[in-house]
Amino acid sequence: MARSVSVWFALSAILWSVTAISAEQSSETNDFVLTLDHSNFTDTVSKHQFIVVEFYAPWCGHCKNLAPEYEKAASILSKHDPPVILAKVDANEEANKYLANEYEVRGYPTLKILRNGGKNVQEYKGPREADGIVEYLKKQSGPASAELNSAEDASNLIDGKKIVVVGVFPKFSGEEFESYMALAEKLRSDYEFGHTLDAKHLPRGESSVTGPVVRLFKPFDELFVDFKDFNVEALEKFVAESSMPLVTLFNKDPSNHPFVIKFYNSPNAKAMLFANLSVEGIDSLTSKYREVAEQYKGQGIGFLLGDLEASQAAFQYFGVQESQVPLIIIQNNDGKKYLKPNLQANDIAPFVKDYKEGKVPPYLKSEPIPEENKEPVKVVVADTLEDTVFKSGKNVLLEFYAPWCGHCKKLAPILDEVAVHYEKDDNVLIAKLDATANDIVGENFDVRGYPTIYFRSTSGNITPYEGNRTKEDIINFIEKNRDKIAQQESAKDEL
């Protein structure tokens, strides 16, 4: 069966806390954003060398926040030479859902940059406020790499706040230059690129080099690094590895947020040290953490340092308390977490070593076990999941829900009715688990949205419920999938 939980599905709360938009909704009529749907999408896109499309859902709060900023940006960009076209598609509309599937829309809002009549598709990875959208798209609609003919050109591009990649060449032709331009085109939505004939224009690094060489500038660690292998795959790997800080800082400084997002999106295991970075004596802890990060560089584990003030969403997700800081959490790609609270500087290296050697037991986030559980739908928490669902000897219908989910709230009274229907049947149990407050481990349940419902028979067959959310349909599903042996034994007991 599919993996238990898309590992970073719940971590999206942390990412949204970093990229949250505070824009007010606008009542103005949308005049500049094109409205596309299944009837005109292909024809419209095919006529443009560059167009940006937002896939949205009318009920999505983040989409509502983005709308006035997106419209304002569209208004400004309509006057750009040449104009930059912004469009939108209601991906929740049934007739448009095939477009969302085609463009791999996994959440809302999703923005895509479509080039060459839609032949080339890139993720939009820029800001979500009007001025930021405008500046980002002006650069995206222009050349993939800017020619730097002076120190002023270079300083305008390399501002010391972001990753910038610059190629130094003896001439703007040849295999190395073509490889570099191919890299710039491929990664242009992630990084800014420049190229020059004179390294003396650049603010850092050896100025006498004539190239070909690629110099990556960054606002952390060693500030720049050179690379001379012009194989495109090698270049891409170099940029990816060099553009990650040794230790990513998670605080309220917006300039750090792109690196935080990159950290959480990386395929590596993630070590996260959360502490109050403003207290006296914190330097000994952070310097030791940095030493450990240097020790494990290139070994499949990334390191993040989170300030207590900015980490509330992370604390909620991991189910930890402020009283436990300083604390370190390591999360694998399979969702397993390993935790050490109230640690000292000298605890960091032994903990990471033990984790790498498989000596640290996983940490399981769980709500307290209910003292009373007398309602028709039984409450399951992480610590009771195994006993209730897998060892109870019952046919169990289990709902994974979120307290804030409107669909879950509508389903609640229906599940109550189903549970009452089976109250006198000892072989059937209706249960629910708050998936936002409890970890779901193992390979049995694939929870990607709420509500998600599974049925486990007494013989161990696990089946997702995908039918209508009515009492009758759910009962019919249970009767179809429950173990016949259990039913027969129940009938014998009644005789």
Image: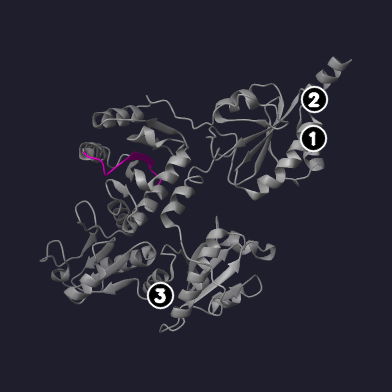
Q: Is residue 457 visible?
A: no
Label 3: how many Cα within 10 Å (few below 14, some 14–19, many 20+): some
Which residue corresponds to mark 2?
A: 425
Residue at (35% x, 39% y) in the render: 271
Q: Which residues are magenta?
A: 267-280
Q: Give, as a three-letter code, the residue at label 1.
A: Lys
Q: Label 1 vs label 3: CA separation?
A: 56 Å
Q: Give, as a three-letter code, the residue at label 2.
A: Asp
Residue 475 or residue 51, whichever sits in front: 475
Q: Label 1 vs label 2: CA separation?
A: 15 Å
Which residue corresponds to mark 3?
A: 141
Q: Is residue 310 visible?
A: yes
Labels 1 and 3: the sequence-earlier one: 3
| Quadrant in which residue 77 is drawn | bottom left
Labels 2 and 3: the sequence-earlier one: 3
Which residue corresponds to mark 1?
A: 480
